[in-house]
Amino acid sequence: MEPNKAHIILDRFNETIDKWIDSLDNYTLEMLCRQPHAGSWSLGQVYVHIIEDTTWFAEQVRTCLLTPANREKEMHENARVLFRNNEFPDTQLTGPSTGVTMRQPETREELLHGLTAIKDKVNQLYFASDPSVSTGKTQHPGLQFFNAVEWLQFAEMHMRHHFRQKKRIDDKLFLDQGGKS
């Protein structure tokens, strides 16, 4: 992979996580914990999910940078489509983590700290080694094997995918408050 492409993906990752960070200023803890519908996640739960998953994705990046293991393994064809389109499909996805009861955040600061810690970790990993020449891969639970740059791209696509969910929750939150959506 060419170094420029890896850096573009890092820039996109930083832009997307910054949008999540900056958006926190728009909510009180009560708003973050309000579920728009019975059985649906609150925005705070979406943030917790993003932090937990992206932390795991960053650990995969780190592992790929440290070892050449699994370099001959390939991603699933469904993953190829995601990467080719550079986005998840515009549908509400189900998977291992969607049926899980997600905890509510305790504070806005917890969410801010979690996101900034991930951003710092990913940037430190990126600049400590050259991910464009890394050959190691680790296994995604359903999409097979990704290298370090692919994990970074997947993390960004995952966060961006949740903007759709955020918009649905925002529409309900701000409608309930008499504001505009």
Image: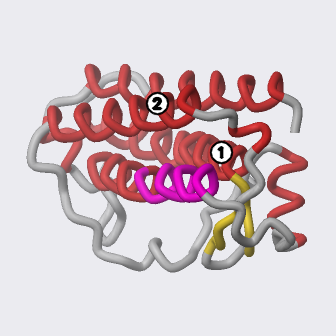
Q: Check residue 157 in the rendering and tell me which mark sits there, or answer none.
A: 1
Identify the magenta region. 55-66
Which quarter of the figure is the C terminus placed in? top left
What residue is shown at x 80% (from left), y 66% (from top)? 71
Above or below residue 14? Residue 38 is below
The verdict on residue 63 being magenta is: yes
Residue type at the position of mark 1: Met
Which residue in the protein does label 2 denote? 124
Above or below residue 118? Residue 52 is below
Which quarter of the figure is the N terminus placed in? top right
Per the image, label 2 sits on a secondary structure element best described as helix
Cβ–Cβ under 8 Å for marks 1 and 2: no
Residue type at the position of mark 2: Gln
What residue is shown at x 65% (from left), y 27% (from top)? 12
What residue is shown at x 40% (from left), y 45% (from top)? 169
Principal SS element in the magenta part? helix
The answer to which image quadrant residue 153 occupies is top right
**Closer to us: 25 or 15:** 15
**Earlier along the polypeptide chain: callout 1 or callout 2?**
2
Above or below residue 125? Residue 14 is above
Query: Residue 74 at what x, y percent from top left?
Result: 85, 70
